[in-house]
């Protein structure tokens, strides 16, 4: 198997800018040597629209979704949207799909968060078949498709990456996907998860906070970590990584309703593992540690406004 190409991604859109104001951002990212832009769906812009604009304004970039929830679109709608983006920027689109979480799926969309592993597996299998243009009549374990045929040709099949945390989904990403999408883990944790993916692409959303203010990093970082790591899928992930004893005080306080004490219970050293911060050279070196341990496509998500995000992107580019 050929080793995956090292790529340089970044998470979009940037905070504080409308989507219409991203034209110059996308053009400068190309000039800075970034190869990819990756978008998500977590209560802001949908995953596709920023990438459609990037396809028009900076077609040199590879576009990626990190991630599309497997539950929140019907089979036909999902296949049509993927095919449309493949058509908008042929050969420059990577589909990132995953189970998402019970928060987004159940609380925000009123969809049962049942059988997440099977739902992602079935969605990947459906997309592989549908994007060939064949007529699909299939009873998958988690949904059925009766007589759907995609009428928009896809000249080049896009890679499909699977958002993965623990062993089962990581193995699925290596076995049936073209790689894995990972986040909320330390550089050393990459050594644990990467072997399950079997040498395929590993895209990582890395949380970057461009500041040298230790107290601010603790304040913002602890709140971000608490918000995510109390979601059941992420709590299970870090328990699997061996952090049950470290994080149990935070989990207990959160469940008891004492959010302030819960965030304060997160050790400062753990903030430094999950939040990349400091001067530009330190940020670049921390990102590189992820890559040394197996990440092939880092996609920093910059915790700041658009001006801070672009300044950080310039610094990361200059430090490479």
Image (tube, rainbow, N blue to C red):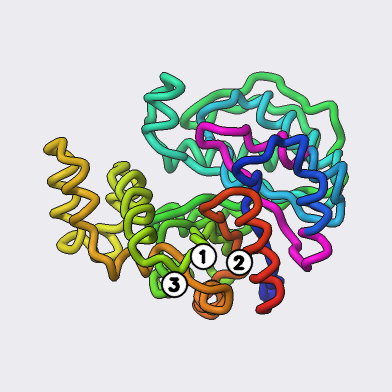
Disc 1/disc 2 C-alpha distance (Å): 6 Å
Q: Which residue corresponds to the image point at 41% horizontal and 65% vertical from the top-left? A: 213
Disc 3/disc 1 C-alpha distance (Å): 16 Å
Q: In the rendered image, which quarter contains the C terminus?
A: bottom right
Vertical placement of residue 202 versus 3, above or below: above
* Tag 1 near tag 2, CB within 8 Å: yes
Q: Out of 224 and 2, give the one closest to the viewer.
A: 224
Q: Which residue corresponds to the image point at 51% horizontal and 50% vertical from the top-left? A: 163
* Tag 3 near tag 1, CB within 8 Å: no
Q: Which stretch appears magenta?
A: 29-52
Q: Out of 152 and 220, give the one closest to the viewer.
A: 220
For disc 3, the marked residue is 187
> Mark 3 against mark 2, which lies toward the viewer?
3
> Mark 3 against mark 1, which lies toward the viewer?
3
Task: State left or right for residue 9 relative to residue 249.
Answer: right
Q: Earlier in the sequence, mark 3 or mark 1?
A: 3
Helix, strand, or loop for circle 2?
loop
Residue 200: which numbered mark, if any?
2
């Amino acid at each position: 198997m050929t080793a995956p190409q090292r790529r340089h991604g970044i998470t979009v859109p940037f905070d504080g800018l409308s989507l219409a104001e991203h034209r110059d951002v996308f053009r400068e990212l190309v000039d800075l040597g970034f190869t990819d832009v990756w978008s998500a769906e977590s209560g802001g812009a949908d995953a596709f629209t920023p990438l459609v604009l990037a396809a028009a304004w900076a077609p040199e970039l590879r576009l990626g979704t990190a991630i599309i929830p497997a539950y929140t679109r019907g089979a036909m709608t999902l296949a049509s949207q993927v095919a449309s983006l493949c058509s908008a920027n042929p050969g420059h689109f990577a589909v990132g799909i995953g189970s998402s979480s019970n928060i987004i799926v159940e609380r925000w969309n009123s969809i049962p968060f049942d059988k997440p592993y099977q739902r992602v597996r079935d969605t990947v299998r459906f997309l592989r078949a549908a994007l060939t243009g064949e007529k699909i009549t299939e009873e998958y374990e988690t949904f059925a498709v009766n007589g759907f045929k995609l009428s928009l040709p896809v000249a080049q099949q896009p890679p499909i990456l699977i958002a993965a945390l623990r062993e089962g989904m990581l193995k699925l990403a290596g076995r049936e996907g073209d790689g894995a999408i990972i986040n909320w883990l330390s550089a050393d944790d990459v050594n644990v998860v990467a072997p399950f993916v079997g040498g395929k692409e590993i895209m990582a959303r890395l949380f970057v906070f461009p500041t040298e203010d230790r107290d601010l990093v603790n304040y913002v970082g602890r709140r971000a970590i608490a918000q995510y790591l109390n979601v059941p899928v992420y709590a299970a992930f870090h328990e699997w990584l061996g952090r049950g004893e470290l994080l149990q005080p935070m989990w207990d306080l959160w469940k008891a309703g004492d959010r302030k004490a819960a965030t304060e219970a997160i050790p400062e050293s753990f903030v430094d593992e999950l939040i990349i911060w400091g001067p530009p050279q330190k940020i670049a070196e921390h990102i590189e540690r992820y890559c040394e341990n197996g990440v092939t496509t880092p996609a920093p998500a910059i915790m700041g406004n658009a001006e801070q995000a672009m300044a950080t992107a310039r610094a990361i580019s200059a430090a490479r």
